[in-house]
Image (cartoon, rainbow, N blue to C red):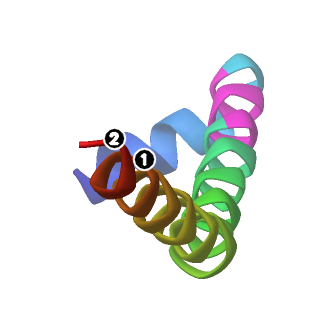
């Protein structure tokens, strides 16, 4: 696997592909970090509010 990655990195088209893979991986890590902190808190609050509203209606 290491040899494959080294060969891919040395090839110009492979190097560009590898760079894009690194960029995408970094973006995924950032998105997961944001999801785990901000979105999860916001979604939990939204679900709690909807549950409360449904509890008062029913």
Percent coordinates x, y for residue 52 in the rendering = 40, 63
Residue span colored magenta: 14-20
Assess whether residue 11 is covered by the magenta stretch: no
Q: Is residue 30 above or below residue 8?
A: below
Q: Residues within 10 Å of mark 1 (few under 14, many from 20)?
A: few
Report the side of 49 relative to 27 (left or right).
left
Q: Residue at x 51, y 69 (%)?
A: 40
The residue indicated by pointer 1 is: 5
Q: Is mark 1 on a helix, strand or loop?
A: helix
Residue contact between numbered discs 2 and 1, judged by CB atoms under 8 Å:
yes
Marking on residue 4: 2
Q: Which residue, as the protein is rendered here, is positioned at the far top? A: 13
Quarter the C terminus occupies: top left
Judge from the rendering whether residue 54 lies leftward or rightward of residue 32; answer left or right.
left
Q: For this view, does 13 lie left or right of residue 40?
A: right
* Element type at mark 2: helix
Q: Which residue is depicted at the point 51% across and 62% down?
A: 49
Residue 55, position as x, y percentages in the image: 29, 56
Q: Nearer the viewer, residue 1 or 33?
A: 33
* Res 45 quadrant in image: bottom right
In the image, what residue occupies the spot 37% across and 56% down?
Answer: 56
Q: Nearer the viewer, residue 47 or 42?
A: 47
Where is residue 30 shown, x and y percent of the image? 69, 66
Other-residue count near label 2 (Cα within 10 Å), few / some / many at <14 / 14–19 / ≥20: few
């Amino acid at each position: 696997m290491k040899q494959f990655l080294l060969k891919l990195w040395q090839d110009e088209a492979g190097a560009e592909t590898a760079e894009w893979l690194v960029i995408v991986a970094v973006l995924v890590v950032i998105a997961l970090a944001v999801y785990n902190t901000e979105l999860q808190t916001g979604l939990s609050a939204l679900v709690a509010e909807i549950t409360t509203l449904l509890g008062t209606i029913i």
